[in-house]
Image (cartoon, helix red, strand yellow):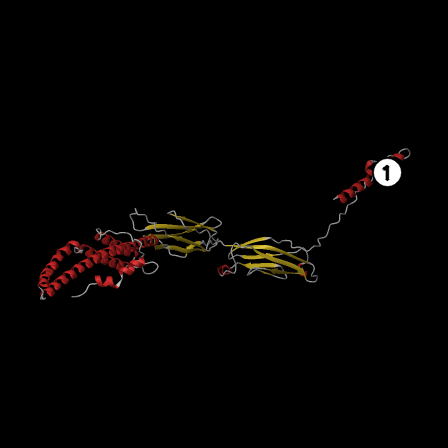
Amino acid sequence: MKIRMVLTFIVLLTISATRSTAQDSVIQKTSTDTIPRLDTIPVTDSIPVVIPVPQDTVLRITNLVPYITLHVDSTLIYKLDVNKDPEKYYWFLRNAPVGLRINRDQGLLTFRAEKSYFLSGRLKYDFPYKVSIGVQNLTDAKEKVDTSFTLVFYSTEIIPSRVKPTVSNVLYIDEGDSVTFRVQCEEGSFPIEYISMTTNIPLTDYKSVSRCNEEFSWKVPFDFIKDGDTTRQRLLVLSFIGSNKFLNRDTAVVRVFVRPALNYPQRMMEYERVTKDIRLYILQLKYSFKELDKKVRKTKNTRTGFDLLSGTTALGGTVFSTMQDEQSKSVGKILPSVGVALVPVKEAVSPVKSYEQNSASLVRTSIRRLEYSLTDNTLVGDRDPDILLKTRKLKDDLKQIQVQLIDIPTLDTGNLSEEELNRYFNSPKVNKKYKVTRN
C-alpha cells in the first residue's frame, strides 16, 4: 500500500512539472506568436501503475470444516480441495472411525453412519472422534499438509438410561439382619452421572449410593419396630434417583418389609445373668445343706450314744441277774431301769431333727434340679433360636425353687470355695446317706 502511494505521488509530480513547462513556453511565445486556443493544448494521460500480486505458494486445504456432526443413518459426501493442481497430490486419513473413507486421488470424504455400528459398540454417541487428515505431493514428499477435524455422532432416537438394583423391588428381612445390594445402571443415549437416595424413614449406620455400581448396605437395628407399633412389620421405602447431564431422571424403588426379631445380644446378656444367678444360688444352697447336714449328723451321733448306753445297761442287768451274788443280782435288777430311764433323757437332750433332715433332703433335691435345669437349657451354637424359651425356663425353675425354699435361710458361702463345697456335696458318705434305696 505504501509503495502504491509513493508511485502515485511521483506520477502527480511529473504531470505537474510537464504542465508548468508547457505554460512557460506558451508565455514566452505570446510576444511573437498568437496564443493558441485551449482546445488545441494537448492533454497528457496519467501513467498506469502496475502493482505486483503475491503468488500463493504454500500448500493448504481450502474448504476443510474443523467440526462435523452426523446423526444415525445419515450419509457424508464431502469434496476437499487444495489451492494447487489436485492431480499432483494424494489424500490419506489416520485414526479414522469405522466406515470413514477418503478417495486418495480426488479427496472425496465419504461416510455412512449405519445404526449397526452403534448397536455393536464399534461407534459411540456424543464421543468426539479426532480424525487426522493429510495431503502430500506425489513428486515432492516435503510438500504436504497434516491437519485434523472432529467428528461427532448423535442419535435422533433417544434411549433412556435406567437405574437397576441387583435385588427385587420387594424384600422381607428380620431385625438384626443386614441388607446389602449393588445399584447398577443400564446405559442409554445419555448415561446416568449421579444417583441420589431418599427414604421414608430416617436411617442410621448405613452406606449410601451416589454413583452407578456402588453398594448400599444397612444393618437393621433390633429396636427398628417400636413397642407401640400396632403392626407386626414396618415398611422401609428406598428410592434411588438417577440423573444424566440433561437432568433427565429415572427412579428405582425398593420396598423393604422389616419383621420383628429377637435381640440376640440383649437376650444373651439376660441368659448369662440368669445362669450366673442360678450358679450363685446353688452354691448358697450347698452351704446351707452343709450346715443342716452337720446338725443332723450331730444329733444322730448323740442319739446313737444314748441307744448304745441303754442297750448296754439292759444287757448288763441280764448278766448281773445270772450271778450267784445277791448284790450282783440287785444290780442286775436296777440296770434295766437305768436303760429305760435313758430313753426320755435321750429325747430331752437330743430330740429327733426331723425338720432339719427333711430340709436337708429338700435342699439337696433342689440343688440337683437346678443343676439339671442348667444342663438341659444349655445354648447350642452361636445363635440358638430357643434362647428366649430356655431363659424363661431357667427363670421359672429358679423362682419355683426360691418359693419352695423360702423358709430355708440362704447364707453366703462362708470361707469355703466352690471346689470345697462341691467336694463335700458329692462325697460318697453324703451320697450314701441321702441315696434313695429300694426296699
Q: Nearer the viewer, residue 301 or 114?
A: 301
The secondary structure type at the circle numbered 1 is helix
In the displayed structure, does residue 384 sit left or right of residue 304?
right
- Residue at point 84% right, 39% down? 17
- Looking at this view, name the residue that lies furthest to the right: 32
Residue 57 is situated, as x and y percent measured from the top left of the image, at 71, 54
- The amino acid sitting under disc 1 is Thr
- Residue at point 18% right, 60% down? 305
Q: For the N terminus, give its image quadrant.
A: top right
Using the rendered view, name the quadrant where residue 165 is placed.
bottom left
Q: Name the residue under label 1.
A: 21
- Residue at point 16% right, 60% down? 309
In the displayed structure, does residue 428 sit left or right of residue 120?
left
Can residue 371 be seen here?
yes
Using the rendered view, name the quadrant where residue 427 is placed.
bottom left
Q: For the C terminus, give its image quadrant.
A: bottom left
In the displayed structure, does residue 196 sit left or right of residue 28?
left
Can residue 393 be seen here?
no
In the displayed structure, does residue 95 sit left or right of residue 119?
right
Q: Which of 167 and 83 is in front in this view?
A: 167
Q: Nearer the viewer, residue 224 or 151?
A: 224
Q: Pointer 1: residues within 10 angstroms few (<14), some, or many (20+)?
A: few
Residue 146 is situated, as x and y percent measured from the top left of the image, at 64, 57
Residue 12 is situated, as x and y percent measured from the top left of the image, at 80, 40
